[in-house]
Amino acid sequence: MTNNRVENAAENVTENPPTPLTLLGLGAMGAALAGAWLTAGHPLTVWNRTAARADALVGRGAVVAATAAEAVAANRLVVVCLLDDDSVAEALADVDLTGKDLVNLVTSTPDQARARAAWAERRGARYLDGGIMAVPPMIGVPAAGPYVFYSGSPALFEEHRTALAAPAGTRYVGEDAGYAALHDVALLSAMYGMFAGVSHAFALVRGEAVAPGDLAPLLSDYVTAMTGFIAGTAARLESGDYTKGVVSNLAMQVAGKGTLLRTAEEQGVSAELLEPYFRLMERRLEVGSGEEDLTGVVDLLRR
Ligand SMILES: NC(=O)c1ccc[n+]([C@@H]2O[C@H](COP(=O)([O-])OP(=O)(O)OC[C@H]3O[C@@H](n4cnc5c(N)ncnc54)[C@H](OP(=O)(O)O)[C@@H]3O)[C@@H](O)[C@H]2O)c1
């Protein structure tokens, strides 16, 4: 078990005999997971609130349960992939979970996951929380790199890691049930920061003789080239020396932000996505050092 790499890439997984399991939820993600478990030969019982969504799986060998209770009763390993934490509470409100191994893949907050773990344990189930780092077309396609963060009962993870690895790789991140959600949301938050910058960049060239399709590969390459910032920030946070290895210092970056803001104005583009970050850079310059980079912004964000 490790938390620094994805284990059990689905292509390497063999299980003899495959673990039977139940899956609650056949939305876009649940349907993809169901398909991958069936392809891997796992006997699968499914339930979905809107029953018709299970139709396509019947021909592939899935057993369709009429109720969530019936589906849960069918197998010890029960995977949940419903919309949100409220839908889990609603769907499992009156269901007997005694002796079940509940794996909750619903995207939630760390505290929701911890509360759901305590709720499951009070009801006699072992609990593992998961955060899916993939979109449905990546599920069951190891080359696309799908994986799921898991946290909670280590024994439960060890017991089912092979079955869990059929649709996507596994990455166990700790016994604290909230840690899968914590990692999941940390990555998603970074993703939205990247999306924000890309939206601003496309807005700048909109209306000019620059096709979005021509800017796209330039953006992809440049954003990829800047990812060294991630490891550098981690190293500076860990060492406590925010000037270590700095290649573009904060004083220069704060001075340069005016060019970005003026360009937005010239192009008739709102700077509302950039301004909050620039304000944090300025605040850090006021209390930190111009020889740092942007690492100190991390500390400013902590309340
Ligand atoms: N799709 C993605 O790209 C993606 C990526 C990573 C993680 N996830 C996570 O995976 C989970 C499922 O996402 P999805 O894409 O499959 O969503 P979805 O396509 O909207 O499906 C939602 C599922 O939840 C069920 N549901 C909603 N409210 C319910 C309730 N009160 N009681 C019982 N069932 C209820 C729906 O049943 P009905 O069919 O009856 O409506 C459906 O099965 C979410 O937590 C999502 O954040 C999704």
Image: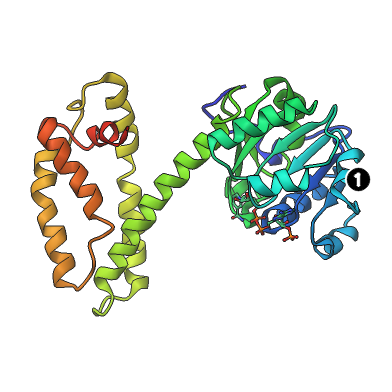
Where 292 sits versus 218, above or below? above
- Between residue 233 and residue 71, name the one nearer to us: 71
Where 37 sits versus 126, above or below? below
Please name the residue shown 11% across and 58% down the image: 259
Q: Is residue 77 visible?
A: yes
Where 133 sits versus 212, above or below? above
- Which quadrant contains ligand 1? bottom right
Where 128 sits versus 136, above or below? above
Q: Is residue 115 left or right of residue 53?
A: left
- Between residue 58 and residue 7, name the one nearer to us: 58
Q: Which residue position is annotated with label 1?
A: 70
For label 1, the crowd category at 10 Å Cα-Cα, with few meaning under 14, some 14 to 19 and many 20 or more, is some
Position of residue 227 measured from the top left corner of the image (x, y, whole percent)? 34, 43
Does the beta carbon at disc 1 come under 8 Å from ligand 1?
no
Model colouring: rainbow
Q: Please state which amino acid type lies under the numbered disc 1.
A: Glu
Position of residue 68 measured from the top left corner of the image (x, y, whole percent)? 84, 47
Quarter of the rendering containing residue 303: top left
- Between residue 116 and residue 192, name the one nearer to us: 116
| Residue at disc 1, secondary structure | helix
Q: Is residue 242 left or right of residue 63?
A: left
Please name the residue shown 58% across and 42% down the image: 108
Please name the residue shown 91% across and 54% down the image: 66
Which of the image's four quarters has the N terminus?
Answer: top right
Position of residue 50 measured from the top left corner of the image (x, y, whole percent)? 80, 62
Q: Is residue 291 visible?
A: no
Position of residue 273 measured from the top left corner of the image (x, y, whole percent)? 28, 57
